[in-house]
């Protein structure tokens, strides 16, 4: 039997909140930055706003994985603590790969 | 290429169109956006893929935020398969930095052709209805399915196959800038016993993490142009919103046939261009 229904429902709500906030704030940054860049070409502020928007966008799925690690730890569900931690480490690995390629340029 | 306001607005518009078709066909916008950015706008395919991946993250996050709470997304299965998709995505992102423009373009053409043919094959798709008294086990799930009139429970079969295909999907996703659901969903549904709606929702949930692992590599390599990604993300968001509303009224069958034909033509153009 799937005995995790109640905890899973709680995690689903947490994830829902994280995704909503992430999409909402990143879209706001991207929209303001984009409109700004269209009205004053070459604006450094506009470029910063859009970059921040993209970083928030990329941080959104990472945050929900991190929240899952935390939530599964509370539940003492070690298998899923392990799985979600591996996913986080894989994202860290892609940051490292990004730095390696960055240095090559 | 200089980022002009005209180019930004063009990409915003392309995002709306790609998002609308993507949402209507259940494909996601990337499969349309990447060829447009590459062939019509003339961006390198890595730059096109990077932009497209950011739209995948946005679509995954907003779609999953709307769906979460209905038990349709199988969180545990998604998180288990993410181990494989993120590893694949890491591999695909690195591969993209090593392959030539022509090679990636040819691979995209092949993938696009496969997707078009798959779409034609599923024209008369019938929804498989699993039993309601199955013990879902650790990775299975249950959800309320109005189409079969009640709670549906399912067990995950052939987990190694699901993991393997997720790994492949992750690779393809990062390398080509698409979500990869088109690879995972048919396998999860046909071979692993997961009802189509749950498979699609779980895949859409996973691709945010998959695309992020890939997008980070492109971003670090300076291939993610903020203004163009911002335009594409906002366009695709608006387009998917429109697509979900128009899609219910449009004839899905006719649209699928037309779009499959368009995709085959675009795939052929991409393949030929790649041989220069």
Image: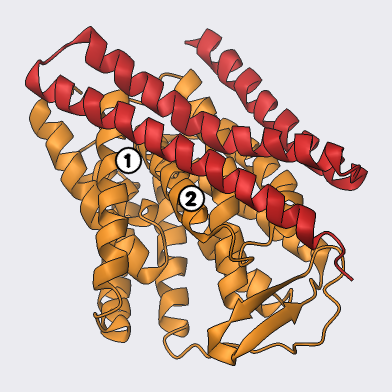
Chain colours: A red, B orange
Q: Position of residue B108 (x, y in %)?
A: 42, 52
In terms of secondary structure, where does tag 1 sit?
A: helix
Location of mark 2 (residue) = B60
- Residue B168 seen in the figure: yes
Chain identity of mark 2: B
Q: Residue at x 26, y 26 (%)?
A: B227
Q: Is residue B223 visible?
A: no
| SS at badge 2 | helix
Q: Nearer the viewer, residue A10 or B155?
A: A10
Q: Is residue B190 left or right of residue B99?
A: right
Question: As displayed, is residue B185 above or below residue B276?
Answer: below
Q: Residue at x 82, y 73 (%)?
A: B136
Numbered mark located on residue B123 in the image:
none
How far from the left and from the top, in percent, is residue A18?
55, 39
Q: Residue A33 at what x, y percent from top left?
A: 24, 23
B124 left or right of B139? left
Residue found at x 61% / y 45%: A15
Q: Establish if A77 lies above or below B50.
A: below
Q: Residues within 10 Å of mark 1 (few under 14, many from 20)?
A: many
Of residue B251 and residue B43, the one placed in the foreground of this image is B251
Chain letter of disc 1 in the image = B
> Which residue does the image show at 81% across and 70% down from the upper left?
B158
N-term-proximal mark, 1 vs 2: 2
Judge whether B38 appears above or below B263 on screen. above
- Residue, disc 1: B233
Q: How many marks?
A: 2
Task: Determine crowd level at label 2: few under 14, some 14-19, many 20+ residues with C-alpha closer than 10 A.
Answer: many
In the rendered image, which quarter is residue B9 located in? Answer: top left
């Amino acid at each position: 039997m799937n005995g995790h229904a109640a905890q899973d429902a709680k995690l689903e709500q947490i994830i829902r909140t994280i995704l909503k906030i992430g999409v909402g704030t990143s879209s706001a940054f991207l929209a303001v930055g984009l409109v700004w860049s269209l009205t004053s070409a070459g604006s450094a502020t506009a470029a910063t706003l859009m970059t921040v928007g993209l970083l928030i966008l990329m941080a959104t799925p990472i945050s929900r994985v991190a929240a899952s690690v935390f939530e599964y730890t509370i539940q003492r569900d070690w298998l899923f603590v392990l799985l979600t931690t591996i996913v986080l480490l894989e994202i860290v690995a892609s940051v490292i790969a990004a730095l390696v390629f960055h240095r090559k340029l | 290429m200089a980022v002009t306001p005209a180019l930004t607005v063009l990409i915003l518009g392309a995002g709306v169109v790609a998002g609308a078709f993507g949402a209507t066909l259940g494909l996601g916008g990337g499969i349309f956006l990447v060829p447009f950015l590459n062939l019509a706008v003339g961006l390198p395919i890595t730059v096109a893929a990077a932009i497209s991946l950011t739209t995948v993250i946005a679509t995954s996050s907003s779609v999953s935020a709307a769906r979460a709470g209905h038990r349709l997304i199988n969180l545990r299965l998604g998180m288990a398969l993410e181990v494989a998709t993120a590893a694949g995505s890491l591999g695909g992102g690195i591969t993209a930095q090593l392959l030539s423009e022509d090679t990636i373009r040819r691979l995209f053409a092949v993938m696009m052709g496969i997707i078009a043919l798959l779409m034609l094959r599923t024209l008369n798709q019938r929804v498989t209805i699993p039993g309601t008294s199955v013990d879902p086990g650790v990775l299975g799930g249950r959800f309320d399915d109005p189409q079969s009139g009640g709670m549906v429970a399912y067990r995950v079969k052939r987990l190694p196959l699901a993991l393997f295909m997720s790994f492949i999907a992750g690779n393809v996703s990062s390398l080509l800038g698409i979500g990869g659901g088109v690879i995972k969903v048919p396998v999860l549904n046909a071979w692993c016993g997961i009802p189509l709606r749950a498979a699609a929702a779980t895949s859409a949930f996973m691709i945010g993490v998959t695309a992020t692992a890939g997008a980070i590599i492109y971003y670090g390599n300076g291939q993610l142009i903020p203004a163009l990604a911002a335009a594409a993300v906002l366009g695709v968001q608006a387009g998917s919103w429109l697509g979900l509303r128009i899609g219910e009224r449009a004839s899905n069958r006719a649209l699928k046939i037309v779009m499959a034909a368009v995709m085959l033509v675009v795939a052929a153009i991409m393949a030929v261009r790649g041989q220069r």
